[in-house]
Structures are given as structure tokens and as C-alpha cells.
Amino acid sequence: MKLKKMKSKKNIVAKVKIGVLVSGGGTNLQAIIDACESGILKGLAEIVVVISSRPDAYALERAQKHGIHSKPITRRNFDNDASFCAAIAEELKAHSVDLVCLAGFVHMISPEFISRFQGKILNIHPALLPKYGGKGMYGHHVHNAVIKAREKESGATVHWVDEHYDHGDIIIQKKVPVLPDDNCESLAKRVLEAEHKIYPQAILKVIKEKW
């Protein structure tokens, strides 16, 4: 009697679970969603929860449209930053998040939060770090500073988060030109386009290195 050969099963690798923290419109969130659904992160990662510090943030609606669990957790409902960040951490833990992505999250996260997710938190910054980083350097403040300094180029940076503003190791950067007639809005638009490209690329790079 001939023995039937057993078909070997391929190793099934679980998708990396991403939690995204937002405060606004969520265009970078959308870029990551698109990459997970039909782009470079398809089959490798999925967003399992979106947490917003503002209950009216359009990012929450983006998440809902794609069937992603979303929840507002607002700072004013807590006595201090530590308890605010602890509530966010518990929500991320409840969804077994592997990687935390800050995408326009406007609050400083606590040292306890960073310690809890050490080596698992990414942030995107609208400049070429270490230039134009640090406390107060966000959004239009960054672009105005770049234009005022008459820089020839700016860009976007994805980096690891540590206990200091915009200080962690850089994962990926993309440069864009600063044009002679640029204002804050025109430069911001160009930099944002770069952000949408490199955030999924940075996540892919991290997945390949860590998982």
C-alpha cells in the first residue's frame, strides 16, 4: 500500500497590529490604511485601533469608514498627563497592539507610556530632523521657521519616539524643495505629500527588521 504524502503547511505569520494616535484630520492615518489594504503593507500589517485626543477629529470617521475600531480619549477628562496616557495605553493593550504610530497627535506622551511601549512607537515630523524639531515645533510653526530661515529644502522624517521631543533615532526621511515663492500653506502641502509616502515605507522597514 502506498503512503500518501503529507502536504506541508506554509508557516502563517500573523499581521503586525498597529494602533494609531491622532488629533486631527488623519491624512497620514489614511495613507497607512491604504497601504495596509492595498499597498506595501497588505498582508503584513493591519490597524486594529485608532485613538483620537479630540472627539470631533475627522480621523475617527476615516477609521469608521474602514471598519477600524476607534475611540476618543480626551485630555480634559483626566487630572494629569500620566493618567491620560495610561488610559490610552490600556486601550492599546486591549487590542494587543504591536506598533504605535503617532499621526498628528498633538500631546506629549508620558515617560511611563514610552517605557511601556519601548521600541514600539513611531512619529512623523514635518521637517528634516534634527533641524526644526523640539518643543513648539509642530505644524505651521515648523514651516514658518523653515521659510524664515530661507532654507533651500525641507521634508519629512519618521523616527522612533523617546523621552525627548523629536529626538529618537531616524528611520527614514524624504526631502522636498523650498521654492522662492513658498508660503506656509504651499510648503506644508508639499511636505504632507512626502509624509504620506514615507510613513508606510518606515512601517514596512520596521516590520522587516523587527518581525
Image (cartoon, rainbow, N blue to C red):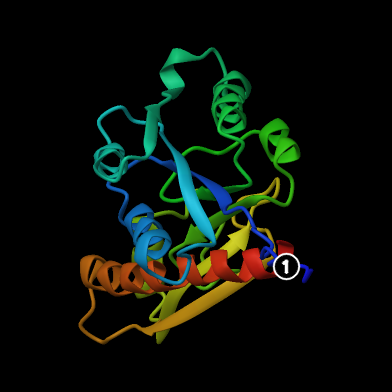
User: Residue at 50% across / 62% down in the picture?
Assistant: 43
Say which quadrant the C terminus sits in: bottom right
Residue 127 image point, x, y percent: 47, 69
Q: Amino acid at mark 1?
A: Lys
User: Residue at 47% across / 66% down in the picture?
Assistant: 200
User: Residue at 42% across / 18% down in the picture?
Assistant: 76
Q: Secondary structure at mark 1?
A: loop
Whether residue 135 is visible to the viewer of this picture, yes or no, is: no
Which quadrant of the view contains residue 205? bottom right
Residue 134 image point, x, y percent: 57, 55
Name above or below for residue 89 compared with residue 138. above
Foreground residue among 95 and 114:
95
Name above or below for residue 147 compared with residue 162. below
Residue denoted by label 1 = 4
Foreground residue among 62 and 119:
62
Say which quadrant the N terminus sits in: bottom right
Residue 162 image point, x, y percent: 70, 50
Which quadrant of the view contains residue 189? bottom left
